[in-house]
Each structure stands twice: as structure tokens, then as C-alpha cells.
Image (cartoon, rainbow, N blue to C red):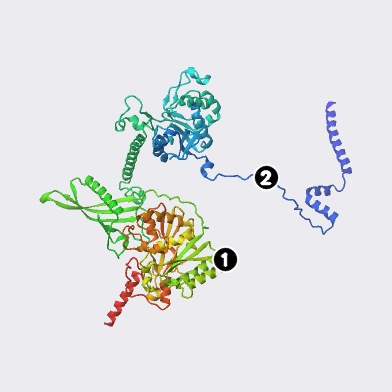
Amino acid sequence: MRRPVAALSRNHYFVIGLLLGLVLSCYIPEDIWELVQQEECPQEAAENLLIERFGQDFEPHLNLINKPLAAKKPVKNVIRPRYYSSELGIREKLFIGVMTSQEHINSFATAFNRTTAHLVNKIKFFIYADSVKTNYKLKNIVGFADTHENRRPFHVIKYIADNYLEEYDYFLLVPDNVYVDARKLSALLYHMSITFDLYMGGTHIGVPSSEGDGPAGSGSGDRNYCSLEAGILLSSSVIRKMRNNLDRCVRIGITGDHSVNIGRCVKYASHVPGCQESFQGMRQYSYALNTPGRQRRDFSELAKEEAFRNASTVYPVPTPEDFYRLHAYYSKQHLETVQERGYALEQKSYRIANGSISNKILEIRWPLGVPPPSAPETRHDILIWQMLNETHSYLPNGNVEHAVAPLTRIEALDFAKVLEIALQYAALKHPGLSYHSLHTAYRKFDATRGMDYQLHLNLQKGSGRRRRLLLKSFEVVKPLGRVEVVPSPYVTESTRIAILVPAFEHQVPDALEFVAQYERLCMQNQDNTFLLLIFLYRLDSPSKGDEDPFKGLKTLALDLSSKYKTDGSRIAWVSIRLPEQLSEAVRPEDWLLHASMYGPKQLLSLVVADLALPKLGLESLVLLATPGMSFKADFLNRVRMNTIQGFQVYAPIGFQMYPCRWAQFCKECEACDVAQSSGYFDRHNHDVIAFYSRDYVQARKLLHPQGLPIIRSDLDIDQLLEPASQSRPEGVESILDMFVAAQHSVHILRGVEPNLRFGHDVRNHLGRGSTLPEQLPEQCGREQCIHLASRKQIGDAIIRYEDRSILHK
């Protein structure tokens, strides 16, 4: 009876489910599928809703008012440091702090500074002083007003931590009577890691425990401190911890021994157990001179001890002079070490090559480390060997006009030194030969390599009748040293230039063209310049009225000054009356062939500057020009950049143009670049020079006692031009020569200037129908006269002339 009941229960489930399905189908709405489709496409439903509300012509519009909204928290710009080293945390290696006194500044401290400062990154001298005096020779002095002796090292620690903690890895504290071998110490520090605390130096036994205060100064732990007498080396991490606990260090540093006070502070702040005589396998050695047996001993005897040779600090140094003796010994030791390493490296390189590997791959050349000779790009760039002997050189600087020229004093000393070195090497290489004479010698300068010498020596073998001469050749190279950029003060291109243009009476047409050029380039462009014309009158020439030879220039200057008055540009003039010996009538063609506008009297340039500079002032930038020159605006900017007050004088080398129409060897072209066929750079023309008035006045005062008097009025010109003035410095003929002879502190810069050109006076003179003299004028040598054509052009003309002569025959 139970099985039918179970079957009936399963049927009940089926029947109930069927009835529920029928009932639900009757109550489901008819648009159920439409609702499902709307839920599947919400975008279409939204569009239909908008059409129902606003119609078919609805167009959406974007609301951009106050959008996009500003961020509630503004984004901060990342400020990066100026240097990569600051961002990467790269620091310098060593800072030395020297504890000295006012009495030792000019003795021990000065000796310490001269022997160490150029070999370390930074050095400071710490003294007790109410106010640091400014008359000390040393400038890196720090003074403390606190006179408590036990607090002195803590003032030093605080100063270092506040100013240099993030700039250096290691700090060395020493008294002023310790010599530091900075080369050896720096090499030691480069082998140690900065990530660990370092407290290194010579061991110093601490004070008895009864003098301590509290736990830090009691028991056997108050020992094993580094001795300040030999120098204490601290890492930047230890200095940082000492600064953070400086108050506690001051309280526990109550002894009169600086070594103990510093040691207690290091032990308390960094928990370093004691002085580290060695660290990471490296050891700093100190050598004490005050121990028995070492006092009053010569350094040559001390050098036999290994401890002395390995020491990086030597203390206490008895006198300042001993600093220099120690420095000389250790410098010699380092030099010998470097030479030995260099020789070993050279021999190793040769052994590696051994002829089995191509030298083009190894690039092993002699001397090792010196660049090879530069390869010329064209035949014009070939470097020429110059023949010379002990007294003279042949064809100097490739100048065929002078076959032989004596060596200068510097060149003679240089050649004597080179010959001495060659003879020493010859004695080692050929011990059985002796020097007899110099056969020939050559030299060549390569700007990328240095000076090369080839020496051919006559060496003697045997003596008496068996004597015979052997010719041996040697090559000597003087490589270039480390090239350094000369630091110069900051200058700008906005400085006002006072242009001085002197003119003789026969140069008035050229001066008129110069003024017209000045108006076009400077006055119209509102360039920051001022033109001062210097009129050189003859003794009997009128200076007023219609007969004034400079009337046209004066009228033009007044007209242009009034025309550009609102721009601040003006032209002024100064009149100078020449003495009787310079008042003779001058034919223009007699002076045109001179390289200088002053003809045979170049000293007149000093007269012009002496009498014109009082009109300008001592702070003016002066450009002394000539009426026959032409220039561009770039030239004025170079004058501003290359002329530096108290530092540098600029003497440009202008381009002298050939009179092409007259000589008919070339074609005139004003806008063309400089070319060998159209002119040359005249190194013997010193008329154009730029300087500051103060530098000129200082140089003139230096030469005034030596026979070069300062001209204060027209009546003093005779004193400068007197031929009997034998006391005048030799070779002074121009302002440039004056700066050289004065040996002033300013530099003299000479350089070619393509935008400065000479030769317009010759061209204008020939354009007016005049001619040039057939012979060179008196007192005009080959260097003081201009060239009318190049050697190549003259040679071609001679060949053409000879060819025509042969054809006529």
C-alpha cells in the first residue's frame, strides 16, 4: 500500500506545476516583450522620450559654463635642482677643518694652506676672535666669539653641520701644526664606503674615570679615543648624529682635552665603540715627530722609515718652513710613483701588442698617451718643419721675406733644454759615444699634439787618429699640458663705446666718408656709441672761418648731432695743434703706402689718446679707429665683449684690401668674404685698439718714469717726439706696444677681424684720379708698408710678362 502513495505524491508535483503555469499565463500583460526590448536599448528609449517631449526638431547643446572644474588641490610643480650632483646626492670627498689661532694665521696656518688647499675640495680655518680681521692673507677664516676652550670643537662641529654636511663625505679635523699628505689621504678615502659610520685616527688614551660625569665618562669605556694631534677623520653620518646630540655633547665634554671631548660625543651620538685605526681593510697612518729618537732628525733620515713613507699625517711640525720641506718630499714621492706606474703601463702596452695585433686596433703610439700628428685636409694645411740651430731659425713662420731670424730668449732657452735632454738620452743609449756637434735640427708645432723636434747629432767614437763621427737622429716631443679656460669677468653687449677718429688735414675726404658710414650703421640704428673726432691741425693752419680745413667735418657733425638729438646720438670733436716738425705739407700718396694712418710717426697715437681721454672719463670704453677703415655692427659687439675693464685689452687684426682696380690683379667686391686674392690680415697695423680709459691711464703712469712722458697739452708733443729721448722704452711705437712694455696686469687679446677692413683710403685716392708713388717712401720697410697684391698674383704677372717677351723675340 506504500508504493502507490509514493507514486501519487510525484504526480501531485507535476499537476501542481502545470496549474501554476496556466494561472501565470493568464495574468502576464500583452506588452511584456516591448518592455524587455526597451530595457535592452536605453539609448533608443531616451531618444524616443525626448521626441515625445520636445518634438522632431530638438538639437542637444553642451553646457560648458564653468567647465572643466578646477582641481580642489592644485598640482605642485616639481622643482628640480640645478645640478645633477644635487639631485643624485653626489658629494665632494674631503673637507678639512683646521683649528688655529690669531697668532698662527700668518705662519703655521699659511703654510698649511699653501701645501694642502690646492689638493682638497675645501678647507676652513677656525679661530677665537671677537671680529675676524680683514687684513689676513687667508680669506677662508671662521671666527668664534665664545672663548670657552672645551667648547671649541663643538663650535666647529656645529658650523660644519650647518653649512657643509650635505656637500662632503668626510671631514678631517686637525690643529695647525699637522702636515697632511692630501694626495694619499684622498686615495684612501676613495676605497672606503660612505654608508658606514667612520671615526678614524691615531689612538689616544682617555682620561681617568674620576674626571668623567655620569655613565659616559666612567669606567673602562672612557678610553680609546682618536687623537686630535694627529687628526680625526669623521664621516658625514657621524657629524649628523653629533649635531643632533650637541647639547648632550657639550655637557659631557668638560675636560681640557679636545680629543676626549670629541671622542665622548662620537661614542654617545653614534655608539661607535672607539677609534678605528683601520676600516674595511684600509688604514690611515700617522707619524709623530715628538717621540724620542725622532726629534731634531733630518727628513732624509726619517724617509728611510717605512712608517714615515706611509704616513698621511705628520705631527707636530716644529716650524712653518718644515711644512714646505715635508711637502717637497711627499710630492717627489708621488711624482716618482706616477712615473713608475706610467712606465709600467707603457711597457705593458708594448707587451700586449708584441707585433701580433695591428697597431691601428691598439692605437699604441709614441709617446704613449699623446695624440698623433694631425692629418692635413688639404695641401694648404700641411704643417712645415722649421730648420734651426742654437742661435737662429731659417724661414721663420714661413716668411720668405726673412730667410734667417735670431731666436728669442725664450726660444733659445727652450732649444737648449731640449738639446740637453737629447744628450742625456744619447749618453744612456750609446755609452761609448760622446757628443761632438749639432748637425741639423728641425721643429714643428701641432696645435693638437705639441712641439716636435728632430735632432741630428754628430757623436764621436774613439779618440786620436781612430776618431770618427757618427750621425745619430733623435726625436723629442713636448706634449701639450692640460688646457684650462681662463676665467674672465661677465660682460654684456650694451656698453657704450666712445669711438675716437683722428684725422690729418689730408685725410678730410676719408673722414667725411667715415662719418657717413657711422651715421648709417650707428646713428640710424640707435647703437649705443659716441663719436669723437680729433682734428690734427698743422702749426700755421687756421681753425676758424672758411679757410678751416676741417670746416666740412664740423658742419656735418653739427647737422647730424641736431638730427639725432632725440636719440641721444651726437658727434663732438677735439682740436690738437701739431708742433713745427710735423707741420710740413704732406702729399697723401706719400703716406698711403704706410700700414699706419700716422705714417712714420706712429707715436702720435699716444698723443691722440692722452689729449682726448680727459674729455671722456676714466670709466669709458674707448675704440681708437682710423678714418680709412670700414666696419660692421658685429665688430662693435665684439669690441664690447672682448674689452674688459681691469682684465683685457682688444687689438683686432683688420683685413687690408688690395687696390684691385689699380693693380688689375683682382676684382673689387665690398660685400664679399675675405679671400687670399682680395687682401690679407695686416698684423703690423696697430692703429685700431679698444681699451678702458682707466687701464690706459694706469699703463701710461707705469711708463712715465721710464722716458715716455704723458702729454697734457699741445706744447708737450715735442717731448714725446724728440729723437734725443734715449731713455724711452725700446720698441714702443703705438698704444699696443705701450701696453706690452708697461707689463700691466691686463691681458692683450689679438685676433683676426673679418668685419674690420682697411684700404678704402687707397681706393678712394685712386678713384679721385691720383696715383701711387713708384718707389716706397722713406722710413717704410717691408713690414710697415701695405701690399698691393699677393705673391701669387705678382708671380703670375711676371710669368705672363716673360711669356709675351719670348713670343715677341
Q: Quadrant of residue 305?
A: top left
Name the residue: 34% across, 70% down.
792
Q: Position of residue 421 (x, y in %)?
A: 26, 48
Name the residue: 42% across, 64% down.
714
Query: Height in image: 442 above or below 251?
Result: below
Q: Which residue is mark 2?
A: 74
Name the residue: 16% across, 53% down.
469
Q: Which residue is mark 1?
A: 565
Residue located farthest toward the left when viewing the structure as drawn: 465
Query: Does residue 800 appear left or right of residue 556 in this picture?
Result: left
**Circle 1: element type:** loop
Query: Height in image: 290 above or below 618?
Result: above
Q: CA distance from mark 1 to mark 2?
A: 54 Å
Q: Position of residue 439 (x, y in %)?
A: 21, 55
Quadrant placement of the C terminus: bottom left
Query: Does residue 587 appear left or right of residue 21 in this picture?
Result: left
